[in-house]
Amino acid sequence: CRVRHYKFNVVMKNTTRLCSNKSIVTVNGKFPGPTIYAREDDTVLIKVVNHVKYNVSIHWHGIRQLRTGWADGPAYITQCPIQPGQSYVYNFTITGQRGTLLWHAHILWLRATLHGALVILPKLGVPYPFPKPNHERVIVLGEWWKSDTEAVINEALKSGLAPNVSDAHTINGHPGPVPNCSSTDGFILDVEPGKTYLLRLINAALNEELFFKIAGHKMTVVEVDATYVKPFKTNTIVIAPGQTTNAILTTNRALGKYMVAASPFMDTPVVAVDNLTATATLHYSGTLSSSLTTFTSPPPQNATPVANNFTDSLRSLNSKKYPAKVPLKVDHSLFFTVGLGINPCPTCKAANGSRVVAAVNNVTFVMPTIALLQAHFFNIKGVFTTDFPGNPPFAFNYTGSPPANLATTTGTKLYRLPYNATVQVVLQDTGIIAPENHPVHLHGFNFFVVGRGLGNFNPKTDPKKFNLVDPVERNTIGVPSGGWVAIRFLADNPGVWFMHCHLEVHTTWGLKMAFLVDNGKGPNQSLLPPPKDLPKC
Ligand code: C2O
């Protein structure tokens, strides 16, 4: 293993998309940002230098950060932000992980343009558990706003209303041909015929789950969220913000150009999302320039069966070499409702004196002004409490008619876990306002998705159907609209770990909480001390 050094200069860059120009926050002037390459067991040092007017922090999404929570990145959770003119070196070792992950800004809405791929290759000499592909390609999916994204969310918070939806989706930074603007502005995936390509697919969009399709080609899924899965073939990949998927594409069709499409998936009766499909072109070398592109039509926005079919196909590889270490007994059995609510807001005139909020177990999380991990490590009182409820304050028909009172409580509440506790969390979507898909992400751990269903979770019958043999292991899971998922993990990583909906609008509204995991008593079971250059608040 070796040490890899990267330098991330956070700088503004004038960028034109959809025929309009704006200045965006980037790393090293690139959108999407640079790819980080490392191998399992490597130590990675990334010096982030902030040259812009915003506070910045960067999260290495899906990296376990064993005992190194200081390098995790969510602003005010594990660190204070890097202020303008300042820098911070993220220093972490990649332990027991290989595959595709992503990095992204974890403050305000800067993630819109501040994101990129994190590629972890297996240890030298260790093969993939599938035939070695001839080539590899990174594909980052995103969203584009013509206006300034910080202005979009600030305006929404002031008014109490939902923020504007994006103006386009993007594939490797490009929306593809857009009517009345451009017929050519799309990413081109150049391939040779008769080869295999490992596509490393990342959803870096702020607010939308996406379908991904390539005309005329099936893909073989081999990995999600940097864990191997039992390979299966599919026409359509479903990928939520924060999720990653590795799939093998075989270029065995006639020479030609084939449309690649990324389109929104949103299963909710009331929220209209923009239905602009981003397109790119799979281009076989040797194709005549005059040849026409083979089209594909994306699934409809609410194609839940397509999404379910994909999700149900995901199983851990669970081989001798890569066993699924599912916790079989549960020390902490938690039930979390995730959903929206409405709180009073006297200044929110546009929304009739109220504002949309979001909550876990009816708690709308309030961001502290000192990082929680610092408050924990240095024993600073009054920053957080450890009374996050393990169950909803009262039971109701979660997916039926909403309770009379839609208001939530507020607080900076953490749920405390002893070192090495085994945890089960049932995440139950609620129909308050409306049911919605929520891709929930847990920092610091991978979890196993042992169960999933529609309607209200039934604690008597549903656990009997749990898959404790080869459930998929990941770091971000879509809670189905009007349904639930059950996850299990081992709390073997001391520190403060954020859990939140990866739809940025829901995070902003408060759909977030954190776990506090105590140190263990043995050697190498404690959170390491903070680095000297840890930013100050
Ligand atoms: Cu990818 Cu807390 O986020």
Image (cartoon, rainbow, N blue to C red):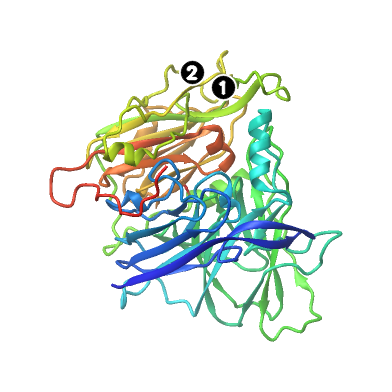
Question: Label for residue 400?
Answer: 1
Dot 1: what SS? loop
Say what amino acid the circle numbered 2 marks. Answer: Phe
Furthest residue toward bottom: 286
In this view, 329 is above or below 69: above
Choose between 23 and 160: the one closer to the eye.
23
* Residue holding disc 2: 396
**Residue 537, located in which quarter of the rendered image?**
top left
Q: Is residue 420 left or right of residue 68?
A: left
Q: Amino acid at mark 1?
A: Gly
Q: Is mark 2 within 8 Å of ligand 1?
A: no
| Place of residue 300 in the rendered image (x, y in percent of width and height, measured from the top left) | 70, 48
Bin the neighbour count of mark 2 within 10 Å (Cα to Cα): few under 14, some 14-19, many 20 and up. Answer: few
Residue 257, position as x, y percentages in the image = 71, 75
Which disc, if any, is residue 186?
A: none
Q: Nearer the viewer, residue 233 or 381?
A: 381
Can you say whether 322 is above or below 190 in the image? Answer: above
Question: Residue 301: x and y, percent?
Answer: 68, 46
Q: Nearer the viewer, residue 50 or 519?
A: 50
Q: Is residue 287 above or below residue 301?
A: below
Q: Is residue 196 above or below residue 386?
A: below
Q: Residue at x 74, y 65 (%)?
A: 295
